[in-house]
Image (cartoon, rainbow, N blue to C red):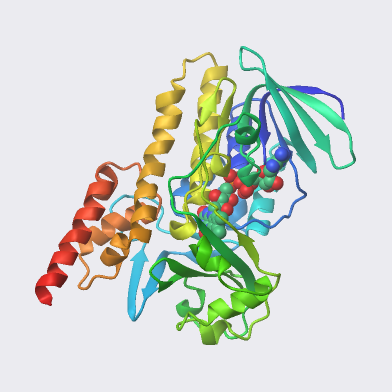
C-alpha cells in the first residue's frame, strides 16, 4: 500500500472508532480506519446501556443494528442472598431510551463496521499501527504494518485513538497512569444454553452478587448462547487452580441461583481471564489527537458503561474535530476532557461505592424508595450528564449519605 494523507486517522474499528468514522463521513470529513485484526473478532463487553442508542441513532448506525434482532435489555437485575433488585429503564428520572441490547460483540462490531464501509469509509483490516510521530502543529505521520508484512505511512491532521486495550497512543506517548480503583480481574466464557427457562427469566440480564466484592454476570443472547463471567479482586480470581475451565467450573458452585442452570453446559471457548482491567491516562487529548473509548479510561464492568463511554467519547471527539477542521475554535479542555470526565466521575463513584458495599446497601434495602430508584436507574441507563438528577449532580455525597441513613435505620431496628 502507498503512503496516504487524510484529515482524520482512526485507530481501531470497535464501537468507538465506528461511531467516530460514521459521524466524520456524514459531515464530509475525510477519514481512514486502520484495524489490527480481521472482523468478526471476539471482544468482551456485551451488555449495553440505553444512552448508546442515542449515539447510534445520531450517526446513522441504528437501523443496521435493529435488523440483527439482538436480545432486548429493558433493565438489569441484581441478586444478593434472597433479595432481588430490578431496574426497569422505562422507570427512570431522565427521559431517553428505555431499552438497549445484549449483544455478541463479534457480530455487533462486525455489523457496525460493515455499515461504516457501506457509507464509503476506507477501513483496512489486518493493519496495525506501530509508530506515530507528531510535528509541532500536531500533524502526524503514522507507520502501519499490514498482515502481509508491508509498511506504509498515513499523514493526518488528527488521530482518534480508539484502539481499546491496544492503547496505542497511551503506550507510544507515555500517557498511561494507574487507575484509582482496586485491582480487579474477570474470567468469562460463552455457553450454548440447553436449560434456559422459558420467558423473561431465561433472557434477563443478571448480576448475581455471590460475595460482597465478587459477582457473576449472566447475559443471554437472542442466538441461544449466554455470556457468563465472574468479576472480583485479582487475588480472588487467582486463588482458583487448574485450567481456566476448571477454575470457572469451581467458581460456578458459588452461585446458588445459577449453578443448576449452568453446571452441565459446555463452554464454547476456553474461559478468558483478564487481569487488572481498570485503566486510566494522564490526558485525554493533545495537539493533533484524542483518546476515546477504552484507549482512554476503563473503570469496571459492573454497570456495563464501557461501550457507552466508547461511543460517547468517539462521537464527541469526532464532533470537536469537525468543528476545528471547519475553522471554529475548540476548547478541548472543557468540551472534551471536562465533558467526558464528568460522566466518568459519576460512574467512578458508583463503581467504588459498589465495592465498598454502600451502593449494595441501597440496592438491596427494603422497602425500596421509588424516587431514589428512578434517579439511580437513570444513572444505570447511562444518562450521567443530567444535572437535574440529584444522583448525578451530588453523586458522591448522596450515595454515601443514603447508605449511612440505611446503616442508622438498621442499627435502630436491632
Ligand atoms: P474495542 O472494542 O476494544 O476496539 C478496539 C479495536 O482497536 C480492536 O478491534 C483492536 O483490534 C484495535 N486495535 C488495537 N490495537 C491496534 C493497533 N495497534 N492498530 C490498529 N488497531 C488496533 N462494556 C460494556 O459496555 N458492557 C459490558 O458488559 C462490559 N463488560 C466488560 C467485561 C470485562 C471483563 C471487561 C474487561 C470490559 C467490559 N466492558 C463492557 C468494556 C468493553 O469491553 C469496552 O469498553 C469496549 O469494548 C470499548 O470499545 P472500544 O471501541 O473503545 O474498543
Q: From the viewer's perspective, is 346 left or right of 285?
A: left
Out of 171 and 384, give the one closest to the viewer: 171
| Residue placed most toward the observer, 390 or 72 | 390
Extreme residue in the left direction = 412
Of 329 and 365, nearer the camera is: 365
Is residue 389 visible to the viewer in this orientation of the structure?
Answer: no
Q: 305 left or right of 288?
A: left
In-front residue for pair 30/340: 340
Q: Position of residue 1 (x, y in %)?
A: 87, 30
Which quadrant of the figure contains the C terminus?
A: bottom left
Whether residue 377 is visible here, answered yes or no, is yes
Residue 171 higher or lower than 112, as above or below: above
- Relative placement, left or right, of 214 versus 191 is left
Left or right side of 157 for 205: left
| Residue 257, picture quadrant | bottom left
Can you give x and y, in whole percent of width and height, for residue 23 in the image?
58, 34
The quarter of the displayed image where residue 135 is located? top right
250 vs 3: above or below: below
In which image quadrant can residue 344 be found? Answer: top left
Q: Residue at x 24, y 70 (%)?
A: 365
Q: Position of residue 317 (x, y in %)?
A: 53, 31
For the point 89% across and 34% down, the residue is: 150
Q: How many marks?
A: 0
In the image, what residue occupies the spot 66% across and 36% down?
Answer: 168
User: x and y percent of residue 119 in the render?
Assistant: 68, 38
Amino acid at each position: 500500500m502507498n503512503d496516504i494523507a487524510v484529515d482524520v486517522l482512526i485507530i481501531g474499528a470497535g464501537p468507538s472508532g465506528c461511531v467516530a468514522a460514521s459521524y466524520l463521513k456524514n459531515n464530509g470529513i475525510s477519514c481512514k480506519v486502520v484495524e489490527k485484526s480481521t472482523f468478526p473478532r471476539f471482544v468482551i463487553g456485551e451488555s449495553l446501556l440505553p444512552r448508546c442508542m442515542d449515539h447510534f441513532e445520531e450517526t446513522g448506525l441504528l437501523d443496521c443494528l435493529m435488523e440483527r434482532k439482538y436480545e432486548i435489555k429493558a433493565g438489569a437485575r441484581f441478586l444478593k442472598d434472597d433479595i432481588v433488585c430490578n431496574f426497569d429503564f422505562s422507570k427512570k428520572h431522565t427521559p431517553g431510551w428505555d431499552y438497549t441490547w445484549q449483544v455478541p460483540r463479534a457480530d455487533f462490531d462486525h455489523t457496525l463496521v460493515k455499515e461504516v464501509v457501506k457509507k464509503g469509509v476506507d477501513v483496512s483490516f489486518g493493519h496495525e499501527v506501530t509508530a506515530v510521530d507528531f510535528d509541532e502543529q500536531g500533524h502526524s505521520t503514522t507507520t502501519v504494518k499490514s498482515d502481509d508484512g508491508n509498511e506504509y505511512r498515513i499523514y493526518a491532521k488528527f488521530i482518534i485513538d480508539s484502539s481499546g486495550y491496544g492503547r496505542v497512543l497511551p503506550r507510544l506517548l507515555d500517557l498511561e497512569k494507574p487507575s484509582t480503583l482496586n485491582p480487579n480481574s474477570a474470567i468469562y466464557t460463552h455457553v450454548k444454553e440447553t436449560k434456559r427457562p422459558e420467558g423473561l427469566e431465561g433472557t434477563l440480564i443478571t448480576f448475581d452478587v455471590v460475595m460482597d466484592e465478587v459477582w457473576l454476570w449472566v447475559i443471554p443472547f437472542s442466538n441461544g448462547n449466554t455470556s457468563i463471567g465472574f468479576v472480583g479482586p485479582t487475588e480472588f480470581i487467582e486463588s482458583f487452580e487448574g485450567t481456566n475451565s476448571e477454575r470457572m467450573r469451581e467458581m460456578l458452585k458459588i452461585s446458588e441461583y445459577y449453578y443448576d442452570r449452568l453446571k452441565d453446559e459446555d463452554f464454547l471457548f476456553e474461559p478468558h481471564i483478564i487481569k487488572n482491567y481498570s485503566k486510566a491516562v494522564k490526558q485525554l487529548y493533545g495537539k493533533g489527537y484524542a483518546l476515546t473509548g477504552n484507549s482512554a479510561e476503563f473503570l469496571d464492568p459492573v454497570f456495563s458503561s464501557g461501550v457507552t463511554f466508547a461511543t460517547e467519547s468517539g462521537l464527541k471527539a469526532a464532533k470537536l474535530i469537525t468543528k476545528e477542521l471547519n475553522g471554529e475554535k475548540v476548547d478541548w479542555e472543557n468540551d472534551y476532557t471536562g465533558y467526558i470526565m464528568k460522566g466518568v466521575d459519576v460512574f467512578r463513584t458508583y463503581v467504588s461505592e459498589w465495592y465498598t458495599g454502600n451502593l449494595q446497601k441501597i440496592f438491596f434495602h427494603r422497602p425500596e424508595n421509588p424516587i431514589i430508584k428512578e434517579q439511580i436507574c437513570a444513572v444505570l441507563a447511562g444518562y450521567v450528564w443530567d444535572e437535574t438528577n440529584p444522583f448525578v449532580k451530588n453523586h458522591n455525597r448522596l450515595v454515601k449519605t443514603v447508605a449511612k441513613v440505611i446503616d442508622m435505620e438498621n442499627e435502630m431496628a436491632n
